[in-house]
Image (cartoon, grey):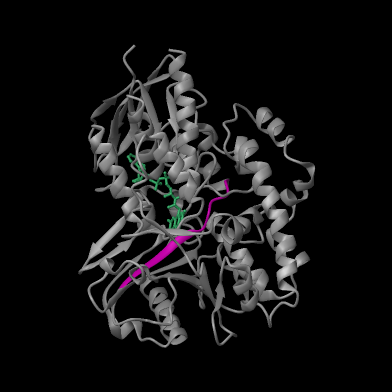
């Protein structure tokens, strides 16, 4: 039998990875993308001689990429480097940044005068986190579930000792094991990778601490993160996958429980045997398929991750004090986390993350210059719709950074771009500008997350941050494997 034709909507990492897995299996694959170039959030901007990665700046679980390329019959073309130190954390009240290492001796040295007995406390904390990771990896994370019931049954196979971690917050768990505020804050930064605060992130996600500090650590890609997109597109082109940019899908045509075609904004009809949606899995069901369960009110009542406010600076000179990855925090972590993300007012003293990718990829900036990426998590567009204060917020952050690392970023700036949640929503269709898609509370993961298989149309599937298993580059790669399994099972039945 001739292999079916698949149409993939969106060239984010999930879309590209699924396209390659299917093309490897002999499927004819075509892709449509509303943006002018591929990658989705894994995108780049080239401006005034500088190259900026737009979103992701590092990733965990590097072996998922190796497994993915193996599945596609190619050697991993990415040259990746471990982050060492993993990152630096600047507190306002400390003179020096805290350097966070995977190496436990060095890490203990960082906290020597801050948390007595740190090494033993950390070992105990990580042992529990390790158990959560390994006890859920194959039972929950890397698994398709057909119903809430099968998911709940799956959960019963996870040792009962992890149950309290579903109902306690990450902050409370950290508070029960460490005394120093600085340690608790540093260890809880991982919750922001899930797009939430440690006060509303369940303690089971301490597994992310195990992933960063013990398991596989963090990595980035030689040449910049956009190399992932560049290499995937090369492989897709080798396999004759056709990609159409500036093409936005706005409507579906269905009959007999199947999608027959999708229509773009210009009215063009796109046909295929299978359709895979890499746009947001919840928002697509609401906005394009008009599902009542995903009406605007219901979508707004779901829990969404924080929105990004991002600044891209090309600067003359070298801000030597900065590490590759840096967090700049204040001294009111709990108050800040609990108040700032649900208001319509920009933070007066913002917390933010800074990445200098030219530090390890000199080709991303002209000689003697540096490219600076600043990410400040802010309220999504449900809470703050007006971003006319973007320039003031950006200036506020740049002033603060200049003061804290003693480098005049204003004066040295050659090029500057600021993206607000409105820009992120507009560029990649991110619902209400939410940066990482749906949040990961217990009611929105596994069998409770929008499924990667449509409820009504048997030839319609989903991949990406808002379906299973969740957000972040490795999770989306795992998601491409799970949806491919779904598709192969479906094709066997037709
Ligand atoms: C600022 C920022 C920083 C991040 N940092 C990290 C990091 O350091 N490490 C990490 O692991 N993760 C990070 N992430 C998360 C990571 O980027 C995402 O989880 C991942 O890239 C999502 O991939 P996806 O497959 O869901 O596709 P997306 O990136 O969402 O791409 C989907 C594509 O579909 C297109 N599309 C949408 N609707 C339509 C339509 N109707 N018709 C046609 N095309 C459509 C969009 O234009 C987009 O190109 C970050 C995210 C952001 C925003």
Residue 446, x across and y down, in percent: 61, 38
- 100 on left or right of 69: right
Is residue 338 visible in this depiction of the protein? no
Residue numbers of the magenta segment: 302-313
Is residue 81 visible in this depiction of the protein? yes
Q: What residue appears at the point 51 percent right and 39 percent down from the top-left corner?
A: 467
- 460 on left or right of 26: right
The residue lying toward the viewer, choosing from 472 and 222, is 222
Residue 149, x across and y down, in percent: 68, 28
**Residue 113 quadrant:** bottom right
Residue 439, x across and y down, in percent: 56, 50
**Residue 373 quadrant:** bottom left
The residue lying toward the viewer, choosing from 423 and 477, is 477
Q: How many marks?
A: 0
- 332 on left or right of 351: right
The residue lying toward the viewer, choosing from 200 and 50, is 50
Q: What residue appears at the point 49 percent right and 64 percent down from the top-left corner?
A: 377
- 190 on left or right of 75: right
Residue 289, x across and y down, in percent: 43, 31
In the rendered image, the vertical position of residue 5 relative to residue 236, given as above or below: above
């Amino acid at each position: 039998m001739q292999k079916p034709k698949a149409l993939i909507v969106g060239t984010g990492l999930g879309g590209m990875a699924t396209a390659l897995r299917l093309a490897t299996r002999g499927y004819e694959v075509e892709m449509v993308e509303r943006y002018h170039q591929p990658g989705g959030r894994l995108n780049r901007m080239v401006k005034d001689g500088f190259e900026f990665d737009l979103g992701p700046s590092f990733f965990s679980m590097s072996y998922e990429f190796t497994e993915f390329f193996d599945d596609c019959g190619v050697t991993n073309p990415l040259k990746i480097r471990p982050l060492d130190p993993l990152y630096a954390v600047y507190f306002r009240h400390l003179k020096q940044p805290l350097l966070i290492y995977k190496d436990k001796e060095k890490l203990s040295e960082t906290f020597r005068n801050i948390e007595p007995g740190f090494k033993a406390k950390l070992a105990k904390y990580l042992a529990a986190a390790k158990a959560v990771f390994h006890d859920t990896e194959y039972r929950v994370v890397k698994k398709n579930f057909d119903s809430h019931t099968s998911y709940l049954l799956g959960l019963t196979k996870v040792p009962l000792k992890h149950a309290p971690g579903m109902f306690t917050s990450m902050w409370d768990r950290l508070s029960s094991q460490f005394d120093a505020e600085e340690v608790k804050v540093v260890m809880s930064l991982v919750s922001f990778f899930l797009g939430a605060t440690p006060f509303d992130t369940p303690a089971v996600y301490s597994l992310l601490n195990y992933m960063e500090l013990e398991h596989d650590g963090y990595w980035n890609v030689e040449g910049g993160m956009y190399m992932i997109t560049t290499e995937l597109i090369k492989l897709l082109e080798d396999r004759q996958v056709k990609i159409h940019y500036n093409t936005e899908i706005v409507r579906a045509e269905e009959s007999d429980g199947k999608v027959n075609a999708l229509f773009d904004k210009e009215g063009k009809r796109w046909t295929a045997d299978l359709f895979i949606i890499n746009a947001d899995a919840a928002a697509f069901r609401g906005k394009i398929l008009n599902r009542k369960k995903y009406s605007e009110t219901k979508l707004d009542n779901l829990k969404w991750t924080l929105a990004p406010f991002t600044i891209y600076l090309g600067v003359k000179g070298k801000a030597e004090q900065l590490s590759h990855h840096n967090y700049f925090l204040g001294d009111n972590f709990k108050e800040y986390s609990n108040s700032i993300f649900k208001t319509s007012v920009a933070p007066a003293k913002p917390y933010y993350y800074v990445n200098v990718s030219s530090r390890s990829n000199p080709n991303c900036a002209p000689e003697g210059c540096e490219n600076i990426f600043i990410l400040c998590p802010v309220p999504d567009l449900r809470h703050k719709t007006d971003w006319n204060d973007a320039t003031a917020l950006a200036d506020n952050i740049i002033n603060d950074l200049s003061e804290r690392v003693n480098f005049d970023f204003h004066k040295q700036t050659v090029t500057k771009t600021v993206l607000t949640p409105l820009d992120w929503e507009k560029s990649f269709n991110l619902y209400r500008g939410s940066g990482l898609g749906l949040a990961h509370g217990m009611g929105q993961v596994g069998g409770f997350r929008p499924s990667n298989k449509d409820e009504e149309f048997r030839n319609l599937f989903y991949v990406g941050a808002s379906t299973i298993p969740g957000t972040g580059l490795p999770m989306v790669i795992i998601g491409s494997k799970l949806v491919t399994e779904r598709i192969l099972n479906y094709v066997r039945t037709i």
